Image: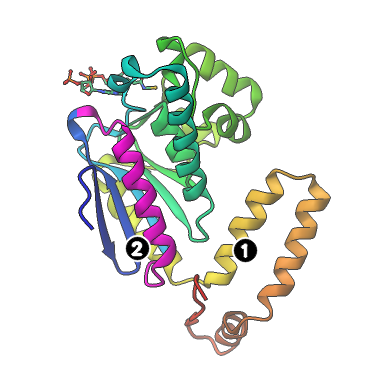
Amino acid sequence: MAWENILFEVHDQVALVTINRPKSLNALNPATLEELDEAVRRVRQDDAIRVLVLTGSGDKAFVAGADISEFPKMNPLQARLFAQKGQDVFFGLEDLPKPVIACVNGFALGGGLELAMSCDFIYASEKAKFGQPEINLGILPGFGGTQRLARLVGRAKAKELCMSGEMIDAATALQLGLVAKVFPAETLLEETMKAAKVMAAKSALALRAIKTVVDRGMDADLKTGCALEVEAFGLCFASEDAKEGAAAFLEKRKPHFKGSFTA
Ligand code: COA
C-alpha cells in the first residue's frame, strides 16, 4: 500500500508507524489522517502484528498539531467534519485490541498531543514538549483533547493547559502522569521498541482484557469497573495462555503464549 504521509514498518511483531511530514513538523492534514486510519485498520487485521508504536519523523516533532494551513479554507461545517474525522480515527486507534505506544520525540502539540493521548501510554524524549495551543488560534482542541487531557491530568490542570496554551516539558509531563517514562532523545526509539517487543510476547487475551477493563472501567464507577475485571479474570482462565503462564512459572521456564488477537 503506497502512503505519502506515513511510513509503516514491522519489526518482530511490532508495527512502527511514523508520521512523515517533517517540513510541517508532521502536522496532520486530512490526507495524513486518512492514511493513519488505514494503517490502524491494517494493524487491527494483521495477526502477525501484536503491538503498535507511533512516532514522528525527524528529531524536532512528534506531531505539531492539525495542519493550520488547511484552516483558512474551512467553513464551520467542514471544520466540524474535520474534527469528527480526527475523533473517529483516534477512537479507532484507542479501540485497537493491541497495545499502542506513543513514542514522542519532540513537539506533541494540539492534535499531536491528542494523538499521543489516544495511545495506551506515552514514552517521551527529554526534549519533548506538550501542549494544547489551540487557544492561541482562537479555537479549542477538536480531536478529543479537552476530554482525554482532563481524564489524564485532572479537570483543573487540563483547563489551565487548554486556556493558557502553555507548553510543558517532558519532566513536567512525567510529574503530571501524562507520560509513562522519559528517555534521552538518542535512545527513545530503541527503548520504546524494546518495551514493545517485550509486550508482544505476552498473552494477547490478557493484554486485550487489561486494555478494555482499564478503558471501560475509567468511564464507569468503581464497582462497575471491578465487575468488568472479575468477568475478564474468569475469561482469561479459559485460555491456553493462562494454563501456559502458570505451568511455565511452576516449571521455572519462560512462558510461550500462543493466543491470537484476531481469533
Ligand atoms: N500546521 C501547519 N504547519 C505547521 C504546524 C502546524 N500545526 N506546525 C508547524 N508547522 C510548520 C511551520 O509553518 C513551518 O513551516 P515553514 O518552514 O514552511 O514556514 C515549519 O512547520 C517549521 O515550524 P516553525 O514554526 O518554523 O518551527 P519553530 O521551531 O520556530 O516552532 C512550533 C515550532 C511547534 C512551536 C511552532 O511551529 C508552532 O507553534 N506550531 C503550531 C502549533 C499549534 O498551534 N498546533 C495546534 C494546531 S490546531
Give the residue at x 31% y 26%: 67
As helix, strand or loop, the secondary structure at mark 2 comes to strand
Picture layout, residue 3 above or below residue 237: above
Judging by the rendered image, the residue that carries numbered circle 1 is 209
Q: Which residues are magenta?
A: 24-50
* Residue toward you, 241 or 126: 241
228 is within the stretch colored magenta: no
4 or 55, which lies in front?
Answer: 4
For image coordinates 56% across by 16% down, the residue present is 160
Relative horizontal placement of residue 2, taking residue 86 as reference (left or right): left
**Dot 1 and dot 2 residues touching (CB under 8 Å):** no
Task: Indicate the position of residue 257 as horizontal and vertical percent values.
Answer: 49, 79
Q: Which mark is residue 14?
A: 2
Residue 183 figure quarter: top left
Look at label 1 and name its amino acid. Answer: Ala
Q: Is residue 202 above or below residue 254?
A: above
- Measured as percent of width and height from the top left, residue 238 is found at 68, 81
Q: Which mark is residue 123?
A: none
Kind of residue at disc 2: Val
